[in-house]
Image (cartoon, rainbow, N blue to C red):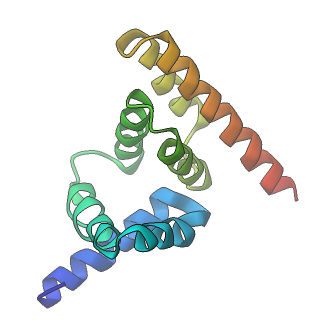
Amino acid sequence: MGSDGDGDVTEAGAQRRQRAQGAKHAALQQSLLDIDPQLAAWSDDFVFGKVWAGDALSWDQQMLVAITALAALGNHAQLRNYLHGALQGGMSEDAMRQALSMLTVYAGFPVGIQALNVLKAVVDSEAKRSSE
């Protein structure tokens, strides 16, 4: 990774990624490693180490940006991962629901409905997981 400063960025990025992805963070990172080790490094170093390091947005705001972008682009597998991480991290289901509902205006009804269906499935899954 380079200098000690780069290692600090990567470690901080790994911690942010773990928080964003929740309980399955290790498996998700391993899936990136299996695809291409460089992708896994970019995830911790650039995405979560540098882009997510900004402090103008709160954690919840950053998560809502990521969640709505993933939903708008139809990236449901990644959306599911972030929704789990957000719920496990204590983010309000209502905030996520409102952000995803707004997609119906800006990205179309099918996009918003699909995103809300993913949220419902994640909420149901988290409820089941916490009751076990």
Report the label total: 0
Q: Residue at x 64, y 27 (%)?
A: 117
Relative side of 84 to 99, left or right: right
Relative side of 94 to 105, left or right: right
In the rendered image, residue 17, in percent from the top left (x then y), is placed at 41, 64
Q: Is residue 53 above or below residue 116?
A: below
In the rendered image, residue 22, in percent from the top left (x then y), is placed at 56, 61
Q: Is residue 24 above or below residue 41?
A: above
Q: Residue at x 34, y 45 (%)?
A: 62
Q: Residue at x 41, y 74 (%)?
A: 33
Furthest residue toward right: 132
Q: Nearer the viewer, residue 15 or 104?
A: 104
In the rendered image, residue 10, in percent from the top left (x then y), is placed at 27, 76
Q: Nearer the viewer, residue 56 or 6?
A: 6
Q: Nearer the viewer, residue 24 or 15?
A: 24
Q: Residue at x 53, y 73 (%)?
A: 26
Image quarter in which the C terminus is found: bottom right
Furthest residue toward left: 3
Image quarter in which the N terminus is found: bottom left
In the rendered image, residue 4, in percent from the top left (x then y), is placed at 16, 90
